[in-house]
Image (cartoon, grey):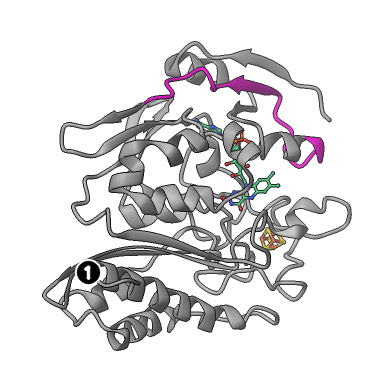
């Protein structure tokens, strides 16, 4: 491991000050960053420990929730208001990692965890544009069963690994950031990037930007929401495909819907085409199939992952069928 300095931030402003002017990284639970440092894929000159920053979940005046970046994944998943008003978020977090990792992992760190592409972690011979820009991408024609079907480029076909982020994308969350230029708010769907020609840049954040909180807007039908993760084993595996959804049904018609996909793209994928196709349509399996097909129409398969296109469509339909049944008082 490359030697590094360590400092513990007293507050958010202190963290940004400590991180300025050096190749520093913020340290949350360390469950991703420390692995990357051990493999020398991440080589920060300094770690700024932000686990002492506010770890609270507070009501906002408009009826949403403000979640401190240092809140542990377990605490967020188990929070009473989250379970009651945004169960999709609770279920998504609980579908990830293990209880021990969720006890350590923070909201800020989960949002900024890096891809699980095997070639990214293989510093010993594999070519990877995300790790070493300009080197090439061994996944493009390599083992790419887990890789992207939407929004990829020839420079990178990696997927974003987080489950929690899929729910945050569906819920229309906002990320609060403090940087050298002051505080700002970023719509969650604009935080992560598609790879394009710069897959080394995961997000739109600037160096030294600190995530201070994630805000959930009020969502009156958020209680009718769900997360489904399809993976190779029942636990301790990243998503092949996942679906986060919330559905509002009025008299058999879709009044409103929120839908996002995981495991399919370089960023959590908000399914805006499917959402638009569903509003005002009957809450039926036919509508859900048509919406899923509209969202996946632009999907492109690699050598090993063509199965994901049909899998994503079937998972969308299954999740929406369940929510429609629940909304109409029947058992899913
Ligand atoms: C074996 C294993 C299995 C896993 N399975 C899953 C899974 O199935 N689903 C899933 O979603 N996740 C999974 N994970 C990933 C896990 O969720 C992440 O490692 C964890 O959420 C990262 O949180 P952390 O606080 O430990 O982040 P850290 O490792 O501390 O940091 C991660 C990144 O975020 C940055 N960072 C941290 N806090 C801030 C902040 N406030 N502002 C700006 N930058 C910040 C760090 O500098 C670093 O770049 C798994 C991890 C492991 C080890
Ligand atoms: S898919 Fe992205 S992360 Fe994986 S090897 Fe290619 S450039 Fe690297």
The reply to whether residue 191 is in sight is no
Residues in magenta, as a range? 38-56
- Say which residue appears at 23% left-offset and 79% top-offset: 283
Residue at mark 1: 329
Left or right of 249, for residue 93: right
Q: Quadrant of residue 47?
A: top right
Coordinates of residue 316 in the picture (x, y in percent): 41, 74
Question: Left or right of 59: which side holds 189?
Answer: right
Q: Does any portion of residue 34 appear in the rendered image?
A: yes
Membership of 314 in magenta stretch: no
Q: Is residue 220 left or right of residue 284?
A: left
Q: Which of the two residues, 234 or 161, is positioned nearer the viewer here?
A: 234
Quadrant where the C terminus is found in the figure: bottom left
Q: Residue at x 38, y 25 (%)?
A: 56
- Which element type, helix, strand or loop, lies under badge 1? loop
- Looking at the image, residue 6 lies above or below residue 207: above
Quadrant in which ligand 2 is drawn: bottom right
* Quarter of the rendering containing residue 146: bottom right
Q: Position of residue 208 (x, y in %)?
A: 52, 29
- Which quarter of the rendered picture does the N terminus lie within? top right
Q: Position of residue 144 (x, y in %)?
A: 70, 72
């Amino acid at each position: 491991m490359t030697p590094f300095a360590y400092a513990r931030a007293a507050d958010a402003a202190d963290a940004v000050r400590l991180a300025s002017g050096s190749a520093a990284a913020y340290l949350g639970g360390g469950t991703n960053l420390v692995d990357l440092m051990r493999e020398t894929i991440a080589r920060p000159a300094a770690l700024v420990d932000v686990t002492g920053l506010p770890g609270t979940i507070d009501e906002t005046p408009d009826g949403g929730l403000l979640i401190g970046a240092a809140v542990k994944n377990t605490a967020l998943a188990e929070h009473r208001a989250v379970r009651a008003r945004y169960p999709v978020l609770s279920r998504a977090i609980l579908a990830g990692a293990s209880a021990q990792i969720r006890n350590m992992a923070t909201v800020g760190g989960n949002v900024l965890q890096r891809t699980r592409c095997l070639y990214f972690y293989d510093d010993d011979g594999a070519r990877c544009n995300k790790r070493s820009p300009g080197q090439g991408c061994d996944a493009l024609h390599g083992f790419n069963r887990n890789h992207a079907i939407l929004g990829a480029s020839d420079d990178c076909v990696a997927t974003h690994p987080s489950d929690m982020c899929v729910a945050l994308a569906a819920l229309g969350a906002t990320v609060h950031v403090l940087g050298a230029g002051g505080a700002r708010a970023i719509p969650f769907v604009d935080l992560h990037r598609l790879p394009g020609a710069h897959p080394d840049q995961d997000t739109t954040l600037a160096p030294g930007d600190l995530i201070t909180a994630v805000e959930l807007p009020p969502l009156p039908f958020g209680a009718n929401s769900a997360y489904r993760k399809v993976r190779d084993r029942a636990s301790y595996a990243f998503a092949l495909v996942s679906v986060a959804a919330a559905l509002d049904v009025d008299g058999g018609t879709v009044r409103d819907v929120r839908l996002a996909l995981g495991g399919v793209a370089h960023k959590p994928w908000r399914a805006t085409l499917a959402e638009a196709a569903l509003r005002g349509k009957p809450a039926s399996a036919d509508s859900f199939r048509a919406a899923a097909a509209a969202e996946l129409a632009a999907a492109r398969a690699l050598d090993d992952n063509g199965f994901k296109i049909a899998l994503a469509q079937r998972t969308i339909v299954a999740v929406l069928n369940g929510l429609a049944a629940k909304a109409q008082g029947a058992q899913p």
